[in-house]
Image (cartoon, helix red, strand yellow):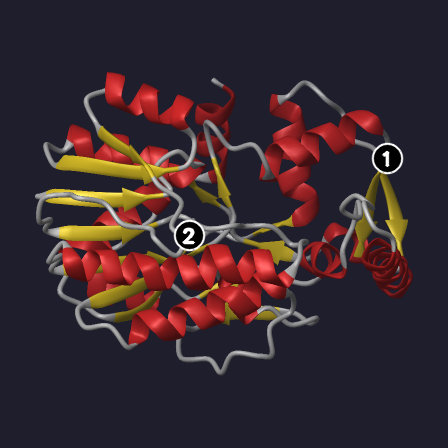
Amino acid sequence: MRIVVTGATGFLGGHLCRHLHRLGHEVIGLGRDATKGAALKIDGIGFHALDLALPDADLALPPVDAFIHAAALSSNWGPRKAFHAANVVGTRNALSLSDRLSAGRFVFISSPSVYFRFRDQLDQAESDTLPPPVNAYAESKQQAEALVRAHTNAIIVRPRGLYGPGDTTLLPRLIRAAKEGALPLLRHGDAVTDLTHVDDVVGGVTCALISRATGTYNISGGAPQTIKSIIEQACAHAGIAPRFTDIPVGLALFAARTAELLARLTPGQPEPIFTAYSVGVMAYSQTLDLTAAWRDLGYVPQITFADGLRRTFA
């Protein structure tokens, strides 16, 4: 197949491009980082620099068989207009480009942040009623999903907690924080979550690509662990003995919301160290039901967290 992958210079997009290329597909990567794009070309992958948030985002490309939209602005903090441009306008332009290229399949990478509530939620299913979005990122993903659902032959995947080689956010941030001092622990670190090695996400997206299913599907590692255990295992691979300090959830949320308010009111203020959303992620259990992905896509997680850490720190 000839496949377009947006966000090709990002963490997930780069892994997708290389995996699909190894399978023998002709891959055309789209992204904004020309340096990383050049590395893709060296690996035999086509690349074109393109910002899908721009109103004239278009390219003269040959017809393709499939279109994977992995490009996104992903953060728990930032101006609403930036998320709207990258994730809503960008998705609208991706759908339009996909149509012009006669793609027979459109795969959209969304986020389980659309489920988030400030409470424990175990085995969240795709059919669950979505709450009001917790932040501008989740709002933009909900809006983008609505655009994709109106498109024929499209499928949405919601992968949770990506980590692996090339990750610059999830585990690296935890390890940096552990090096700097005691880590705040909410509810004794007993909240559970399921992280997903990037290779499992790539496998899930590939299952979505070749299936005939439409709709929305959860993707995760399928083996929930406590927040404290995740931190301890990751730090052990980094050669760090983490220290913890218990903090009441109410106090942490108050401090985070105060920091958010100050950041909004003060021009040039950097992103708060903790946001209400990041506190909620650390405080409350959030796991996904994978029944639909197993039944309809044939997706089964392959990589345990212990094995995933070995691959990440190899």
Image position of 101 with respect to 153: above or below? above
The quarter of the picture where residue 77 lies is bottom right
Q: Can residue 70 be seen in this snapshot?
A: yes
- Front disc: 1 or 2: 2
Q: Position of residue 301 (x, y in %)?
A: 34, 48
Question: Label 2 belongs to which residue?
Answer: 54
Looking at the image, which is closer to me, 51 or 241? Answer: 51
What numbered label is drawn on residue 85? Answer: none
Q: Can residue 124 be seen in this snapshot?
A: no
Mark 1 is on which residue type?
Ala
Badge 1 or badge 2: first in the primary sequence:
2
Question: Label 1 belongs to which residue?
Answer: 182
At numbered mark 2, what does the secondary structure look like: helix, strand or loop? loop
Image position of 207 with respect to 10: above or below? below
Q: Position of residue 277 (x, y in %)?
A: 70, 60
What residue occupies the far front of the structure in this picture?
56
What residue occupies the far bottom of the structure in this picture?
129
